[in-house]
Image (tube, rainbow, N blue to C red):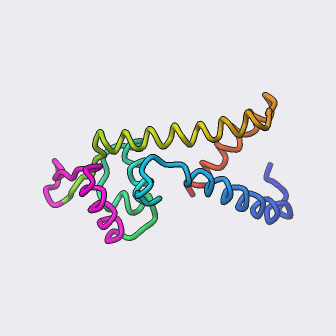
Amino acid sequence: MSAPVEALPATAADLRLATFRLARRLRCVRVADSMSDAQLAVLMTLRLHGRRTITALAERERVTAPSMTSLINGLEEQGLVTRTTDDDDRRRVQVDVTEAGIGIVERTMQRRDELLIGAMRELELTAREVQILREAAALMGRLAER
């Protein structure tokens, strides 16, 4: 059974605002202050999903291939990613995250999780509210993949 169509605009507006505000708070928490959000997103993608081509990374992050190449160049200069020639097609280049890049991702994710855990503790959420947040997170993940 689908949600009532008339509820969608208000729900979309509330979700957009809450997501924007929460994302802004989370973006402030990072290990490497000089790193852009886009660079951190690429490192996180590589950490979570493994080696990718520049084209695949660009598609996933919804940027152009030249923009992704620029991001990768910066990360490579910092020693956070490496490029290797694809085993199957020597014309393609695979990008992988280095141990230093993994460290940045893991420490940043830990700090962001700690921020959320602290906020949830402050609010003294009930078990049901925590379950609702888990369900909402799953739904938001589905929305993000569209």
> Where is residue 88 drawn, in percent x and y?
17, 50
> Where is residue 61 drawn, in percent x and y?
45, 60
Quarter of the image with the C terminus in it: bottom right
Q: Residue at x 56, y 54 (%)?
A: 28
Closer-to-camera residue (77/132):
77
Q: Residue extending furthest top?
A: 127
> Where is residue 5 drawn, in percent x and y?
82, 62
Q: Decide: is 73 above or below 52.
A: below
> Where is residue 115 drawn, in percent x and y?
62, 41
Q: Is residue 83 magenta?
A: yes
Closer-to-camera residue (37/55):
37
Q: Residue at x 76, y 36 (%)?
A: 122
Q: Residue at x 47, y 59 (%)?
A: 37
Q: Residue at x 28, y 43 (%)?
A: 98
Q: Residue extending furthest left?
A: 90
Closer-to-camera residue (135/112):
112
Tell me where residue 20 sits by quadrant: bottom right
Q: Is residue 69 magenta?
A: yes
Tell me where residue 71 sits by quadrant: bottom left
In this rendering, position of residue 103 left or right of residue 53: right
Q: Residue extending furthest front?
A: 33
The range drawn in magenta is 65-91
State the count of labels: 0
